[in-house]
Amino acid sequence: MSDIRLDAIWKKFGATEVIKGIDLTIDPGEFVVLVGPSGCGKSTLLNLISGLETLSSGNIFIGGRRVNDVPPRDRDIAMVFQSYALYPTKSVRDNITFGMSVRHIPRQVQDAAVAEFAGLLHIEDYLERKPAQLSGGQQQRVAMGRALVRKPEVFLFDEPLSNLDAKLRIEMRTEIKKLHQRLGKTVVYVTHDQIEAMTLATRIAVMEAGHIRQFADPFTVYDDPVDLFVAGFMGSPPMNMIEGKLRQDGGSFVECGAPDALLRFPLPDAMARRVAGRDGLKVILGLRPETIFAAGSELPGPDRFCFELPVAVVEPTGPDTMIVFEIGGRDLIARVRPQDARPQGTRFRFEVEMRKAKLFDATTGLRL
Amino acid sequence: MIRQSQGGIVRAQGIGQRLKRGFLFLVLALFCVYYLAPLVVMVSTSLKSLEEIRQGTLISLPQSINFEAWAKAWTSACVGVRCDGLAPYVWNSVLMAVPAVAISTFLGALNGFALTKWRFRGADVIFALMLFGAFIPFQVVLLPMARTLGVLGLAGTVPGLILVHTVYGLAFTTLFFRNFFIGVSDGIVRAAQVDGASFFGIFFRIILPMSLPAIVVTLIWQFTQIWNDFLFGIAFTVGESNPVTVALNNVVNTSTGVKEYNVDMAAAIIAALPTLAVYVLAGSYFVRGLSAGAVKG
């Protein structure tokens, strides 16, 4: 097992800066997911770790060794690509053993390795076929086999599941997690899918515009986002963002909505103390859909706030039903039990668990 | 309307449509005749005896099939003062065309690979310059090339001609392969790099086996160009080392009193047969490869 350390790395393509000074320490055996919108530099960061791109400045250490000038093949890494990048003229077996054959590893060792991983990945029945004769899911398994078979210290995945259909993606996601638990190797995994990030990672690095906004375990990233970007990126449906003003008159409130239909969300004590003395501050109140539910549908608790608004849209998903409503012209989503849903147009009494609300400074975007 | 049940695109029916289609096929047939008529005349003339040629008309068919003219063209027609037929010159052309085609195709593939998958600073400039080479009229390079061959000691030899064709074929072969490789996923090269293969390892074991369509197109193109070349052949070889195109010209221009049209025709067909054979053998690849390049390039 190797650790990976990125030390103030920068990457520029001509005048455009893609990676803007990233420091990151990945512990041995960790499963780190780099997640972010397209163009945030996550794939470039992965290519820098693999050595497929050269650094503009900074240092990369893999297993304690500085690898800035080490070519990909000598970094003891394996990579799985989004397009799978299988060699079209080679059979599945030769695809898997190519890396070993260019390293002149004896035939018996190659065969033993193929036998070991073909079973693990359920590809033993089509070892002699060409990639074009395989389905997308099978190609994906072959690409994984090609990476696994050399038993490298570090695995790099570049959006490996993006080309699969939804059902297969969930299946492969579980298999990747099982493989990681079984092999215990360090993994760096790039995706734009925040659910993949949540389900797979031991730690998530949320990236935006060449920076890492937050690097923490999935629960911290979800429950304790450092800023508006992370809060809005993680979670599906996304967190509701309500613009408002901080009011401190006989308690702390966030006041929002149109002037003739003001809503005052009371802040829990802990949060109120953090923003004490900042009356009138422009803030954004973040409420995840699951913290808004039908009034009375859960056991009563502290810091609950109820309000009544008409239902704009009803979206059943099966286990839950999403109710879309409006505050100050913006659509918000509440996640209610299906039996609590009411038809469009009727007034609905919502209950909010204010203890789970997040408060952000509207100008800086930072968490308050 | 039984015809329509065969599948394909639904077409409008009616007498007007049929007339239009009839007219279309008529025009196509006319062009076929126009294109094939010279070949028919050549083949039929080459099978006639001299006597028959003198008495009959150009388009009359031979009364009896007679391969004497072919035998003479191959073994005993006079090329200048030497009367050994075309055979030694066909051999010259083979010795020249095969290595020239092979080398220029191989180097073109290597160039195309380096220019697309192993990007280096200035790759685009180099490609633009190479592309420029495809537009240089060959007359311009005759004198400098003759001088170069002289300095290298290759003047008037088959190896000299191989060098000339290789150099001037590179612009085209590089273009063909570059346009093919640009459609090949970069991921494959990256995967091979991570797997540990070197530049040549990736080229020979991954990229070259993938590029069969491009190879066939380039082989056909280069073979046709080099086999049919007359200008470089006449400029850079002498007598013994002439390619068949130059020899053919000499067969036709060597006058021994009577103009032997049947021998001339047979010789011309012999000189053209190899390129025809290449098209027949690999023609389907040619069309496929060209359109693939057109879409992806």
Image: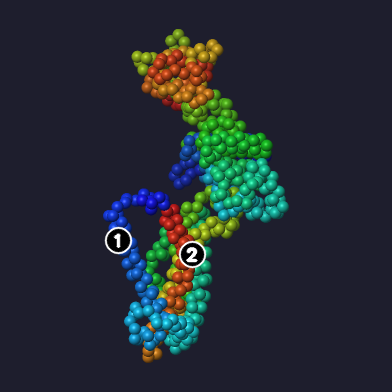
Q: Is residue B42 visible?
A: yes
Q: Residue at x 55, y 28 (%)?
A: A221
The part of the image, by quadrant, that contains residue A189 is: top right
Q: Residue A222: where, in percent of width, then height?
A: 54, 26
Q: Up-down: is B172 above or below A178?
A: below
Residue in the foreground of this view, choosing between B285 and B14: B14
Badge 1: few (under 14), some or many (20 or more) residues near its Cα, within 10 Å?
few
> Mark 1 — residue?
B23
Q: CA distance from mark 1 to mark 2?
A: 32 Å
Three-letter amino acid code at disc 1? Phe
Labelled disc at residue B282: 2
The part of the image, by quadrant, that contains residue A5 is: top right
Badge 2: few (under 14), some or many (20 or more) residues near its Cα, within 10 Å?
some
Three-letter amino acid code at disc 2? Ala
Chain of the residue where label 2 is placed in the rendered structure: B
Q: Residue at x 47, y 67 (%)?
A: B280
Q: Residue at x 37, y 91 (%)?
A: B257
For the C terminus of chain B, the image quarter is bottom left
Q: Residue A163: where, in percent of width, then height?
A: 52, 41
Q: Up-down: is A50 above or below B137?
A: above
Residue in the foreground of this view, choosing between A7 and B110: B110
Mark 2: secondary structure: helix
The residue most toward the front is B2
